[in-house]
Amino acid sequence: MKRILYTAACLLLLTVTACTDEESGLGVNLVDNNTLYNGQQATLTADRALSVRDDSLLTSNYSFGVIGNYQDAGAIFGRVSATLYTQIALDENTSSINMAENIIDSVVLTLVKERTYPDSTATYNFHFEVMQLAEPLQADSVYYSCDTLPVNPAAKYFDQSVSVGPTDTIVRLKLDNSISTILNQTGTAAEFAEATKGLRVRITDAGSMGMLGVNFSASNTCLTVYHRYSAEDTVDATYTFLLSSGAAHFLNFTHNYTGSATGGVDSLDGSTTLYLEPMGGYNILLSFDNAIRAFATAHPTATIHHAELLVPVTASTASMMPDRVLAVAKRNGASDVYIDDLMMDFITMSRFDGTYDDSRNSYRLRVTQHVQGLLREGADPGTMLVLNSRRSSAAGAVINGLSATDHIRIELIYTE
């Protein structure tokens, strides 16, 4: 009798476990989506595709970025240089400073490394240059990737090469002590920012070609001052000024498309090839308008259960692949927004594709709600594809054009 009860209890436990797994969605990707809904399959092909310059990329106060110079080996995107402009700011909890009488012994600028480009396993000999700005960087202004600020030619605080290897986590730049003249200040936080103006940090051509990814939100991305309160003091005190995190900052991206496949024109026809380039390079503008109108006419009551946008990568794309592709919905007479599927992912923190699938040689984006919305409207104002890390990575991708056998398309499952 005990054995019978034990067996029954085990069967009940297995039944509950199976229900839990089904509700959690585990294993859904192991079966054909068509069998989940007993639906019909359809493919929507884009009727228009363009590579368009990303010439209004906002770069103010983002948490991650890049500094340096990069030129892709395939001469597809040409050359790009990335420069940091940043305030020197007091701690957020500090309203004023009194350092006019302090004796500054040394000043060190540190940058927390995310990775190096194009090869994260290589050692680079980066030649850094740090200069004071000639006019203050304004905390209440927005800056774009095309913006620059002038520098004070007489205030160069660093101009040396620094080795950055794969195991390094922090880059340290010991600045010239002439920076003391702008740090020995007494005043409010606003007065200090106005007096110091800010810094331009860049990597020049005197060293290795490459880029340094920087974590601007890290507390160790900062300016540390080692000082004494009087000449009699024998031990240094430290004061940490904020750079980037808690301080206004932005990135400038300067492109040189000479000899490149894109040529730097405002838009390129996507019949054969399309381009996704970071740092104010190129986005992809798609239109499925003809396909959406035809499908809406043929299936006016269709319910879309699953839809994914496939973005096939060409054979010429470098091994340094972008981490994720995002989709932005164009809206007539209104601001562009991320597609509904992505916005729900931000809210629920659920898994969102948008990543590269090497089994299909494509980026895959879930667009179920987006397609259902387009069908309700009966038209497609356009969808823009952008790189997720376009402000903080040098990785770009070359995409098959509409005339390719493996072209951009939406594969969906529906019932009606």
Image (tube, rainbow, N blue to C red):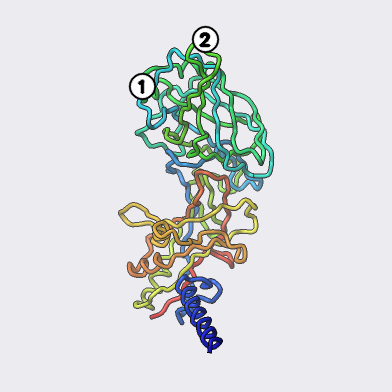
Numbered label tally: 2
Q: Which residue is mark 1?
A: 191
Horizontal side of 348 relative to 200 (left or right) equals: left
Q: List x then y, in percent, for residue 375.
A: 36, 70
Q: List x then y, in percent, for residue 312.
A: 57, 62
Helix, strand or loop under label 2? loop
Looking at the rendered structure, the kind of residue marked 2 is Glu
Along the line of sight, which residue is nearer the eye, 68 or 169? 169
Disc nearer the start of the sequence (1/2): 1
Residue depicted at x 62% and y 43%: 117
Residue that extends furthest to the bottom in the rendered view of this protein: 1
Quarter of the image holding residue 92? top left
Q: Is residue 300 above or below residue 366?
A: below
Residue 83's tag is none
Residue depicted at x 36% and y 23%: 96
Q: Which residue is mark 2?
A: 232
CA distance separating discs 1 and 2: 29 Å
Q: Is residue 111 above or below residue 21?
A: above
Horizontal side of 414 relative to 114 (left or right) equals: left
Label 2, residues with CA under 10 Å away: few <14, some 14-19, many ≥20: few
Would residue 119 be seen by someone viewing this image from the given angle?
Answer: no
